[in-house]
Image (cartoon, rainbow, N blue to C red):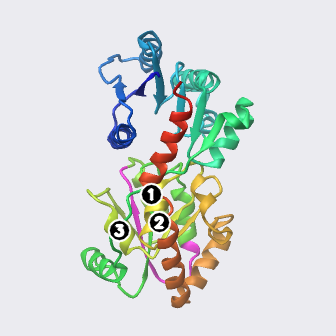
Amino acid sequence: MKNITILEINSTNKNQRFLERLKSALSSKGFNPTSRNYDNIKGKNPITKLLKINKLAKKQKSDELYVCLDRFDSADIYLASDGVQKIYKRLDKFWFLNPLSLIRSKIEKNCINNSAKIITNSNLTRYQLETIYDIKPNKISTIYPGINLPTQVQKGSAKMQLCKELSLDMEFSIILFISNNLKNDGVAEFIKLLSQIQNKINAIIISSDKSAPKYRKMAKKLGVRAIFKQPPKTLNRYYEAADIFVLPSLYNPFSTQILEALSYGSICFTTANNGASEILGDEFIIKSTDDTAKYIDELLNNHDLMVEISAKNIELAKDFTTDKSLNQIIKVISENIH
């Protein structure tokens, strides 16, 4: 039986949390996984660095099963949670001016073709890989991501506390947007949608994106009053206080913000360009900001319906736990380890 080695290019906080959980879950099933990252590979040229990392990973491989969190030529099992590079290129009309984009696309193609198994976090990504790279369906498994569920949800008290802290009117519903990639997750569409809502609302945008001032100006121009905030240490109380969560993504393989918001009983809206839309009802898929704004107004005028949907969303989120997702990933690894 091959040894399991989990590969990542850079040890980010998000990757590190997932990696440690995956290693722990594999260990509990009798495996002895190791992990390897390439934080120590230095270089000012990102293209040279990326090529060097891929070459080194291939050279280091012995009797190992490579489970890759990033794109590697030598991947055995590729967790394609970052989406498809060619789709990102379509969002950037000047992609051809970035040589790194070309290299990433080449490595992605090799990674997809060389992997024995690919795990996507949505059917959206699965379909894109099948059509762009002509991959056979049985080579891909879709496993939705999971989250750690809150132990309790007290939306009323959470909203009261947040409104007091931010000097918001408690009588108005809170509509929340959270993303560190404002352009890709559609903050411009979000602001446009806010301008079309007739009811008075409290709008909060949380992001560390440096382009935030640009969208502050846009909001002011459209007469939208929105609070822009840097991400706090924990986002839980914002999800808990929010009545509605909106993410009009241009492209997102599967935003776990949707799961977080659902788990706290927020009414969630996103686009079909977000893999998370697959778990929502059709009425919560943004097809036009005008139609969605009208539906949100209907909800804001129907408190009982909002309470009903909130309760249903809390129950819906219970089917998307970290443990469930990890167990499904381990099953795929187990089937391909020999």
Secondary structure of the residue carrying numbered label 1: loop
Of labels 1 and 3, earlier in sequence is 3
**Disc 2 to disc 1: CB gap under 8 Å:** yes
179 and 337: which is toward the camera? 337
The residue depicted at 63 percent of the width and 78 percent of the height is: 295
Quadrant housing residue 139: top right
How far apart are the alpha carbons under marks 2 and 3? 19 Å
Q: Which mark is residue 321?
A: 1
Of labels 2 and 3, earlier in sequence is 3
Quadrant housing residue 11: top left
215 and 239: which is toward the camera? 239
Q: Which mark is residue 318?
A: 2
**Disc 1 to disc 3: CB gap under 8 Å:** no
Q: Which mark is residue 241?
A: none
Q: Amino acid at mark 1?
A: Thr
Q: Amino acid at mark 3?
A: Tyr
Mark 1 closeness class: few <14, some 14–19, many ≥20 residues within 10 Å: some
How far apart are the alpha carbons under marks 2 and 1? 6 Å
The range drawn in magenta is: 195-208
Which callout, 1 or 3, points to the residue nearer the camera?
1
Magenta stretch encompasses residue 206: yes
Q: Which residue is mark 3?
A: 238
Mark 3 closeness class: few <14, some 14–19, many ≥20 residues within 10 Å: many
Magenta stretch encompasses residue 205: yes
The residue depicted at 64 percent of the width and 78 percent of the height is: 294
How far apart are the alpha carbons under marks 1 and 3? 20 Å
Secondary structure of the residue carrying numbered label 2: loop
Find residue 267 and report its horizontal and vertical position in percent. Answer: 51, 73
Find residue 47 and report its horizontal and vertical position in percent. Answer: 47, 18
Secondary structure of the residue carrying numbered label 3: helix
Q: Amino acid at mark 2?
A: Lys
Find residue 54 and report its horizontal and vertical position in percent. Answer: 47, 17
